[in-house]
Structure formats: structure tokens, C-alpha cells
Image (tube, rainbow, N blue to C red):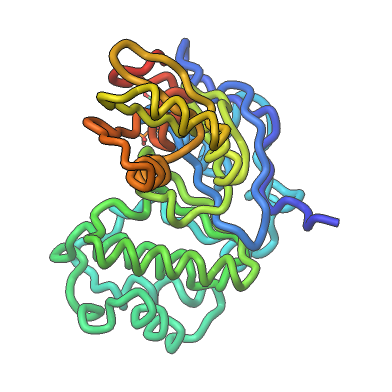
Amino acid sequence: MAAPAAVTVDRLSKHFGQVKAVDDLSFAVRPGAVTGFLGPNGAGKTTTLRMLLGLMRPTSGRALIGDQTYTELRHPAQTVGATLEASSFHPGRSGLDHLRMYAPQVGVPDSRCDELLELVGLAEAKKRRVGGYSMGMRQRLALAYAMLGDPSVVILDEPANGLDPQGIVWLRQLLRAFADEGKTVLVSSHVLSEVQSTVDDVVIVAKGRLVHESSLAGLRDLTETTTEIVTPTPDRLRDLAQRREWNLEEAPGALRIHGVDEATIGAAAFADGIELHRLADVGVGLEEVFLRLTGEPTQGVGA
Ligand SMILES: Nc1ncnc2c1ncn2[C@@H]1O[C@H](COP(=O)(O)OP(=O)(O)OP(=O)(O)O)[C@@H](O)[C@H]1O
């Protein structure tokens, strides 16, 4: 039997006057995996996370950690760690002071603060004032803050913001390690490419509503491989496609083969001595699938 969902959003809505920031949204997030919470700017991600963390009351519906709302949790810091407010640190205080002030509330010793600052790569900067931290350093501090109580659910709002490429690789490994420990990891982003090598599952929202929920593999199933070929000897290519049982389609001045990539077609054409003047991937990639789902205009593809 699958483990019960660690985060459940159930028919959740939040309206600000006429604006339906979150509109009858339902999804579930499982433990032991990294889930991407994705959608364009203004899709309602932060509003959803704020309701999940008890920072905002829903207009209707429920946002649950386990089977409780955040405000019902007996040990919130040990249950959920979040980085919603990465910019709200006091500029005059050091990173270490921030964690030390919070440690007694969470019930952990000061030594845990040093350990965590080491884990997030801030050991050398821990005594510097946060006002002098870069955006990426603040993200790292926010992560240390979230992890202080060793929570089983980790909720991160755009955690890659401000991180350099090495920082992004580091973050990916850290999130993977959390998931491998059995933690529930929910990470929001407005860019699929930023998280696609990190996440196991995706929850995609647009205009406050759910537009897709599946594994990343399930999202990949919506992609289409189509290769366009221009050759001076199209009959020979038609013959090759027939022998290989490829799905070939006639296009103006070109041939298109569905479900077979450029490398496979190029190699087969080369083996048969067929001259090619063009061999191009014209399919629908993961990013395009995401843009279509979220209703963003895409170039050259009917959305
Ligand atoms: N306190 C508020 N008062 C009025 N409208 C709000 C408030 N908070 C959010 N909104 C509106 O709700 C919608 C969803 O905003 P939200 O910040 O949740 O989106 P998001 O998906 O997190 O976007 P981004 O990726 O830009 O952070 C937007 O139209 C936003 O303007």
C-alpha cells in the first residue's frame, strides 16, 4: 500500500476581492519524493504555500500536513520546515545569531546551528551580518532555518532563486538526500527546466487551478518526438521508413517521422547511403508541454 500523503490540498480556494488567486485546488504530495509545484508568475503557488503554513486563511477548502492544518500541529517546527520568507532576516544580525535565537523555540542545542550552517555552506560566513549576504546566501540561510527542527516535510518557495550553477547542483543533491531519508519535499518554481532534473513528481497550476498532476515521467509522456528530414532522394527515405516500420508523414518540401529521434534516423540513412540536407527535431519538448499546459504562448506551436 502506498504511504499516506504527507501534504494534502483539498478543494482549496483563496479569493482577494475579484481575484481568485487559488481556485478549487486539490493535489497530494507523497513522502520520500521531491515534488515540483510549478506554474507561471501569479499562478497561486505562494498563496497556496502560505495557506499550507497557516500564514493565511483559506476562503474555502483545506490545506493539510498529514491530517492536520498547520495551526493544529503540536510540534510545527519538527513537522514542517519552510523557506517562504527568505528576505525577512534582520540585516544587522549574523546568520548564526538568527539560528541561535530560533533554536530554543525548536528545542535544539546551539551545536545544531553550527552543524546546519556547515551543511548549507555558510560555515565561513556564519558570523557575518545578514545584511551583507548575497541572495544565494540568504537562500542557504533560509534552508538552514527550515531544517533546524529536522522536519519530515520541507516546503521551499523558489529555492533556486539567487543560487549560482554550483549552488543549484548542491541544492539538487540536498533535496534528493532529504527525499531518500523519507522526507516529503515540495519545491515551487515558475521554471520547469530549473527543477526537471530534481523532481520525481509535478503539480502544475495556472490561474489558481490544477492543470496537471503526475510523475515527471507522466509529464514526459506528453512530449512528442518528431523529426523533419529533407533529402534529394525522398523515395529512398520512404523505403527505409517502410522497412523500419517508422510512422512517416509527408510535409511541404520535407518528410516527417514521428516517434524516432534524429540520431536514429541519421544513422540509418547514413548506413543506407541516403544523402540528407536537413535533419531536425521539430517535436514537442518538455518545456513546450509545460507552456501549453499553463496556457503560455509558444512560438510556432498551436497552444
Ligand atoms: N495579499 C494579496 N492581495 C491581493 N492579491 C494577491 C495577494 N497575494 C497574491 N495576490 C494575487 O494572487 C495571485 C496569485 O499570486 P501568488 O503570489 O500566489 O502567485 P505565484 O504563483 O506564487 O507567483 P510567482 O511565481 O510570481 O511568485 C496574483 O494575481 C496575485 O496578484
Extreme residue in the bottom direction: 111
Q: Residue at x 20, y 61 (%)?
A: 91
- Relative to 84, 242 lies left or right: right
- Relative to 142, 200 lies left or right: right
Residue 47 position within the rendered picture, expressed as x and y whole percent measured from the top left:
48, 34
**In this rendering, does residue 193 appear at all?**
no
Foreground residue, 24 or 276? 276
Extreme residue in the right direction: 1
Q: Residue at x 43, y 49 (%)?
A: 196
Residue 100 position within the rendered picture, expressed as x and y whole percent measured from the top left:
39, 77
Q: Residue at x 62, y 28 (%)?
A: 25
Foreground residue, 254 or 136? 254
Number of numbered tags placed on the structure image:
0
**In this picture, is 24 found above or below 103?**
above
- Quarter holding the C terminus is top left
**Ligand 1 picture quarter:** top left
Q: Residue at x 27, y 62 (%)?
A: 138
